Amino acid sequence: MAAKIISSDNLQTWIDKLTATCEVYAPSQGKEVSLFKQVKEGDKPALNILTDIPPKGLIFKQVEKILSYRKNEDGIEIKQAEIEPGRKVIFGIRPCDARSFTLTDKVFVHSDMPETHYAKRRQQTALITLACNDACRTCFCTSVGGSPAEKVGDVWMMDLGGRYLVEALTPVGEEIIRANDDLFSKSSPEDEAESLRITERVASKMPVLEIASAKLLDELFTNEEFWIRLSEKCLSCGACTFLCPTCYCFDVRDQGNANSGDRYRGWDSCMFYQYNRAAGGHNPREQHWKRMRQRMLHKFSYFVTQYGDIDCVGCGRCIRSCPVSYDLRDFLATSAVAVAGVDMDFVGELPSEGQPRTCDIK
């Protein structure tokens, strides 16, 4: 389907029409944090912000029941938890967040053992992506394979100032636009050219980061001094993982007794002390530098080796949320130097120390 144009006034009409047929979630600015919330007819989403909390939890629930069990005379009866029915739309999702779902799909959908709850919600949720017209100080999507205007999701949009360039990317996206076709008009070559200019301008604001290959990063595994020095100020609080759109670690726990109960799944973090603790109390990652090593090598080495992509979208939320101002980009910079065999002065090799952590997109 060819790209179309929708005016700012018709954009709100489009959102209102979508809310009449399905659940719509869009960026919302709260008193303390910004996040994706369900919008009703007339609600105006905060489309100009990169939310503090990613929309990950709309599909990969933070806590959910996965089954119930009950002991009876025939043995143990297991009942799978039902997934809430209905179609959903995530409206105004940024390209980095939309891309994060495609990465998690590799683990939960495109695998030998799909995760059924995630897979079903993913199937019944449409993504309407809004390209970025500006970049935060902490954004670096262009260095990890993304773009501020990456065409990912079901429908792609870009704000051209008073009007939006819109393009359907999937059959689901075509259906969404076709159902509201009267709100759209034809786009022009000038519109396409303007979108390219915006993309180039936003991309030019982001740093170009050197990222060592997965194979070279593996060689750092035994470099204990590197990881200890790099993680000295880390608190292992897990904020970086809970606010990361691509982190998918979880724990499973039962509530009940020997006769009946429920099984729940909830988010977990590789930065927590208890994460790898085994039966008997043994913990192979008791020191926090080992947990830092696991997190970094998973994203930039292990995931790359197994799935072919870096498991990071460069949204910068981990940088903005860290209470001790740890910066993921410091790892990328220092690891690139370390694998090159250069003696490191860690104080001099932390380029982001003292830099603002806030997002200046308002």
Image (spheres, rainbow, N blue to C red):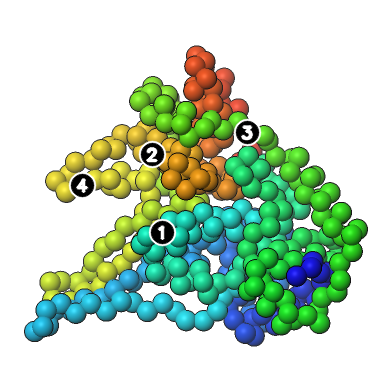
Q: Earlier in the sequence, mark 3 or mark 2?
A: 3
Task: Give the CA separation, mark 4 to mark 3.
Answer: 37 Å
Q: Which amino acid does label 3 sit on?
A: Leu
Q: Mark 1 points at which residue?
A: 111
Q: Mark 4 points at which residue?
A: 278
Label 4 near label 1: C-beta < 8 Å?
no
Q: Which of marks 4 and 3 is nearer the N terminus?
A: 3
Is residue 33 something that shows in the picture?
Answer: no
- Image coordinates of residue 176 in percent, x first then y, are 68, 77
At a point 50% along the width and 68% down the height, the residue shown is 122
Neighbour tally class for label 2: few under 14, some 14-19, many 20 plus, Cα within 10 Å: some
Task: Give the CA separation, mark 3 to mark 1.
Answer: 31 Å
Q: What residue type is labelled 4?
A: Ala
Q: Quadrant of the N terminus?
A: bottom right
Task: Give the CA separation, mark 4 to mark 2.
Answer: 16 Å
- SS class, disc 3: loop
Q: Which amino acid does label 1 sit on?
A: Ser
Indicate whether 1 appears above or below 291: below
Query: Between residues 323 and 272, which one lies in front from this camera angle?
Result: 272
- Image coordinates of residue 146 in percent, x first then y, are 64, 47
Say which mark, if any, is on residue 209: 3
At a point 74% along the width and 66% down the height, the residue shown is 167
Q: In screen coordinates, is 237 left or right of 263?
A: right
